[in-house]
Amino acid sequence: MNRFEYVKSILADRPSTPGETGQAYAPANIALVKYWGKRQRELNLPATDSFSISLGDFGATTTLTPASQDHFILHETEIAPDTPEFQKVFGFLDLLRPEACPLAVESRSTIPIAAGLASSASGFAALTLAANDLFGFNLSHDDASRIARLGSGSACRSIRPGFSLWHAGTREDGMDSFADFLPDEWPDLRIGFLVLSGGKKEISSRDAMNQTTETSILYQAWPQQIEQDLPRMKEAVANQDFEQLGKTAENNAMAMHATMMASVPSVLYWQTQTLETIRKIRQLREDGLPVYLTMDAGPNVKLLFKKETEETLKKTFPELQTAMPFGHLKP
Ligand code: PMV
């Protein structure tokens, strides 16, 4: 089954007459138990389950409006049609829109620039939800998650706020691969960002993932790592056990980077500053501060901590920017 047939089977007999405009916000998310490696590429089906937390106000707002020709405006700047960004966005919209339905896409992100945080997850989730609004598809969260997954795997975990569990599924048609959103709330949980390195990535997460699954001998152990970490993470969230959450997430991120480093050629996202930051975090922990870290496909280090730790952390990391995953909850 290709992407078009897949989306068609989800949309089935739903209406596709555009309204005047469609708009949506979707938060970014960060995996606490990572997605690394696909079982099938066409439909972006992951090899294993993964678990994430959304990032409150850090996310994307997208507006879709029928127009005379396709336009993509990102942060008030027109993106040219021959760029990969433009082609990815409209390649995705082609799955959802009827033929001959040019659209103006206007998108803005509140993710701190160069925070090393993928904007694709919130971007494709917001695009899916804005299309749902424009065309009146009336998608369930599960179906929106199934569709957003095609834009970027991790986008399927950004359809709703909070903790989410993305099921790898086993079906060839991909219908059992979507994210479930947990009812658990953890208001004093914080995710911190340090801008370590701007610059372009040496290798995209998509290519690094494929290189790892094809060549890394350590990748064989990755499903076992997930089998160990997922129940620990679920338990940590259920009991609001911060130490267990932090330890599990940090070990999971390190193990993911180990699988990449063992690929041929080796994928090494770390920079000198990455290691310096890891050392500082370990030192803070040895000094008694409950802070843990996670990393994705890049050199940046993300911090996991609780509200009461923020002040102290800022003494070591004055440039720390903080996301409040449950910031939408009024005290
Ligand atoms: O969704 P993608 O293709 O951008 O891949 C995300 C990969 C990681 O960020 C490294 C892990 C994850 O689960 O988000």
Image (cartoon, grey):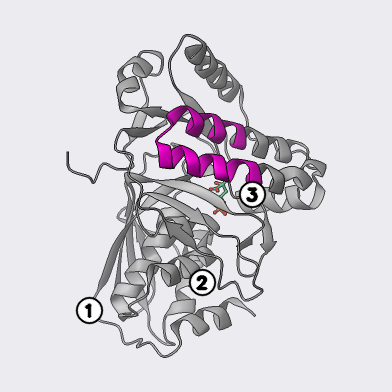
Residue at the (51%, 48%) spot, across then down: 51
Q: For ligand 1, tell me if the residue under mark 1 lies within 8 Å.
A: no
Q: For ligand 1, tell me if the residue under mark 3 lies within 8 Å.
A: yes
Looking at the rendering, the stretch of residues picked out in magenta corresponds to 226-252
Q: Secondary structure at mark 3?
A: loop
Left or right, residue 60 beside residue 284? left
Residue carrying label 2: 91
Q: Position of residue 96 (x, y in %)?
A: 44, 78
Note whether 76 is above or below 286 in the view shown: below
* Disc 1/disc 2 C-alpha distance (Å): 22 Å
Circles 1 and 2, Cβ within 8 Å, touching? The answer is no
Residue carrying label 3: 36
Residue at the (46%, 54%) spot, across then down: 121
Q: Position of residue 44 (x, y in %)?
A: 60, 64
Residue at far top of view: 287
Residue at the (31%, 87%) spot, across then down: 17
Q: Secondary structure at mark 1?
A: loop
User: Mainly helix, strand or loop, the magenta region?
Assistant: helix
Residue carrying label 1: 20
> Label 1 is placed on what type of residue?
Glu
Q: Please name which of the two marks, 1 or 3, marks the residue nearer to the observer.
A: 3
Residue at far left of view: 331
